[in-house]
Image: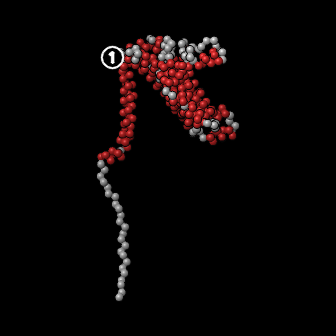
Amino acid sequence: METSTTAPLATAPQRWTPVRREQTWLGWLLDFKPFLIVMCLLPAVGLLSVFLTYPLGLGVWLAFTDATIGRRGVWIGLENFEYLFEDPIFWNAVFYSVFYTGVATVGKFALGLWLALLLNQHMPFKSFIRAIILVPWIVPTVLSAIAFWWIYDPQFSIISYVFVDVLGWRDTNIDFISTAWPARWSLIAANIWRGIPFVAISLLAGLQTIPPSLYEAAMLDGATAWQRFRYITVPMIMPILAIVMTFSIIFTFTDFQLVYAITRGGPVNSTHLLATLAFQRGIPAGQLGEGAAIAVSMIPFLVFATLFSYFALARRKWQQGEAND
């Protein structure tokens, strides 16, 4: 009895054909790039509008009114600014704001850059030293101001104690904040102490991006330490240098807490910055329009400082690009 075996028939592999579904309007919007950009920017734009644009617009509006606390005020045009331009206290605040910003910024950058170069070297306990350096920046400004207020106090100053009782270099205590120029320099010293960590850590981050091979090649060519700093370090950290300088100028020019907590603008209005004078005229004195006018007068200085840093950075990039070509 014979049995016949038949081979199974080979079946062709099935092809899966994608099913095309009709795209909904929501799917089309999610695939539309401009819509996604707008949706991502909308929360940030909303927050900026609420917490920045509205207060700025309200401040500009108040600067052209005679508003006081408890009264809305009416439009008076440029009268607030005309009064300020004839006020010697306002011009004293303008002078000290520019002087305070210039000297403090130079001091912070000189000491901050030196500290960044020092921390960029191989040294023991580098991480611990970096953490210690950040302390002045981390401590709240008011606490720093209170500490300096005690340091500058004519009776309990530790500096006076060292100079009078320990070293015997003086017969009387040092009066730091009772006269104009000593008070001005004392505030600048406090601002420099507080701002050095921000500059040092920011510039240190820029220094660590410089390839060591550049320094090695320069040393092989016989370049001195000053030449390496001038022709390698400074050009390589110029972008971060411009950014840090811009922020430092803005933070210093608009400083309020440190000055107001230590001297409150005294003695005899000699240490008023524009920010502290605007607060004094607007809140304690109740002249909201005049205080807003002082605050608005700060805008041209801030815009000039920002544009100066921006164009200096752009010019440096253009020069480097031209040299590379």
Q: Residue at x 36, y 79 (%)?
A: 6
Q: Amino acid at mark 1?
A: Gly
Q: Quadrant of residue 53?
A: top left
In this rendering, the count of numbered labels is 1
Foreground: 286 or 302? 286
- Judging from the image, the colouring scheme is secondary structure
Taking the image as shown, residue 287 lies to the left or right of residue 163, namely left
Q: Which residue is mark 1?
A: 70
Taking the image as shown, residue 60 lies to the left or right of residue 236, namely left
Q: Position of residue 65 (x, y in %)?
A: 35, 17
Residue 13's place in the image compared with 92, above or below, is: below
Q: Quadrant of residue 170?
A: top right
Q: Quadrant of the N terminus?
A: bottom left
Q: Residue at x 61, y 30 (%)?
A: 114
Q: Residue at x 59, y 27 (%)?
A: 110
Can residue 112 be seen in the rendering of this structure?
yes
Q: Quadrant of residue 13?
A: bottom left
Q: Position of residue 83 (x, y in %)?
A: 41, 12
**Residue lying farthest to the bottom in this orientation:** 1
Dot 1 surroundings within 10 Å: few (below 14), some, or many (20 or more)?
Answer: few
Q: Position of residue 137 (x, y in %)?
A: 52, 29
Is label 1 in a helix, a strand or a loop? loop
Q: Residue at x 54, y 19 (%)?
A: 150
Taking the image as shown, residue 104 lies to the left or right of residue 290, namely right
Can residue 309 be seen in the rendering of this structure?
no
Q: Position of residue 174 (x, y in %)?
A: 59, 14
Foreground: 186 or 17? 186
Q: Quadrant of the C terminus?
A: top right
